[in-house]
Amino acid sequence: MLLGENIAMAMAAIMANKMRALLTMLGIIIGIGSVIAIRTVGNSVTETFSESMSSMGATNISVGVTQRETETVKGGQSGLEFRGRRDRKMPEEKDYITDDMIADFRQEFAKEIDYILLSESLGSGTVTVGRNSAKVSVTGGDEGYFKGQNLELVAGREIGDKAQKGGKSACLISDYAVEKLYKTDDPEIALGKKLQVVSGRTFYDFTVVGVYKLQDQGMLFGGNEDRETTLYTTLGCVKRHSHINGYESFTVSKVADTSVDSKELRSRIQIFFDRYYHTNRVFEVTTSSMESLLDELTNTMGTISTAISIIAGIALLVGGIGVMNIMLVSISERTREIGTRKALGATNGSIRLQFIIEAMVLCLIGGIIGVILGISGGAVAAKLMKATAHPSVSSIIESVGFSMAIGLFFGYYPANKAAKMNPIDALTYE
């Protein structure tokens, strides 16, 4: 019998018992749907995070001063003392990364880094215009910092070199803050305005020279109707108010050259600053990158996907047993049909193939339904998380193939049993 005829017979058998076939496929549908849904969500989270990191400089390397873990000797035994939150110290000015260190760093890594992003924060505060207010965090940055931010101006101009060198109080605010303060979507209204940021008992005065478009970072940062946005000003202005000489952290943007390995560069930067801090018993310089964060997220999502796949595999196993059970019932009901076919000359191989194909078609239909439900469920979950859905094509192909493999594996025993029937016994079966 031809393959097409076997498939047609399988479809006819399934359509003759729709409810029974649907219940049989339920385990396959749940298993495949779970795998596709979780991998769709995992891909969506990873891709959205990757896109967000790329917009913020995925290859950038962060360098910062942190409290070190110190070795202690207690009772004659050595061990590690881990300082907790209550014992956590803030670096003093003498522990900060100095301008001289940064100058030496620029000289040693001149061919491998594009620019350095230096910034300092004055903390959070509130700006009030009449009865309207907006929450802002004040950050001062140098030319490299603003280059790395990639701000999209919707009104005004960037903070110029003259303002940077003079440490002027020129500032950029978000279009969101403009709308909150002036109740208008026209950003031009804020240009040239004097703003006062109130932070506790301290007041800071700024002049607006530009308005930038607030980027919606989706599931990572969005969803807050009373969000705090950044007020950008010059680095010199912030340092004048903070009275701090040095930096607790800064960011390095490496050159866009694939021959410069980010991990190797990060390691060398770590070694460079260890020379300055090897005698400091309290603080050290540590390096990190968004690439490493992305790798950790990918590994985490991979672990979760594997765990869900194992659980879904149990559902597929149960579904496969269900397929075997229903095929045994179907063969029992069609014993006389099998006897008639064998009496008319059907070989054991053709009988076996007929029921294997029926089992595979049953599982294939269940797999396709599971894929559709998995993609739909994953897309809905991704949308709720404000991420773009990214179904895994490889997972879809693997799932469909796996569902057919289940049909082949669990359908073989019933099919083989049917093939080995004695035609006389089959024809006289009641």
Image: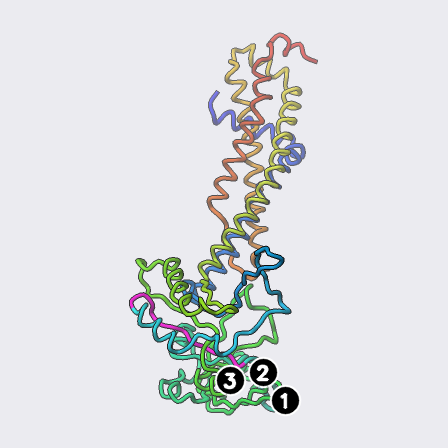
Task: Look at the image and give the residue range highlighted in magenta.
Answer: 111-122
Against 96, residue 322 (above or below) is: above
10 Å neighbourhood of mark 2: few (<14), some, or many (≥20)? many
Question: Which of the pair 276/308 is nearer the observer?
Answer: 276
Residue at 30 percent of width and 58 percent of height:
259
Viewer-side residue, 334 vs 322: 322
Proximity of marks 3 and 1: CB atoms separated by less than 8 Å: no
Q: CA distance from mark 3 to mark 2?
A: 15 Å
Q: How many marks?
A: 3
- In this rendering, is residue 379 above or below 411? below
User: Residue pushed farthest front?
Assistant: 76
- How far across and down, in percent of the image, does residue 122 sit? 53, 81
Q: Disc 1 marks which residue?
A: 131
Left or right: where 203 falls relative to 294: right
Q: Position of residue 385 (x, y in %)?
A: 58, 60
> Most extreme residue toward the right, as rendered?
430
Magenta region, mostly helix, strand or loop?
Answer: strand
Image quarter for residue 380? bottom right
Of the residues under marks 2 and 1, which one precedes in the sequence? 2
**Residue 242 — which label?**
3
Whole-number angstrom distance, CA of label 3 to CA of label 1: 29 Å
Q: Residues within 10 Å of mark 3 (few under 14, many from 20)?
A: few
Q: Is residue 18 left or right of residue 287?
A: right
Provide the residue designation for mark 2: 125
Q: Are marks 2 and 1 in contact (CB under 8 Å)?
A: no
Q: Residue at x 43, y 85 (%)?
A: 236
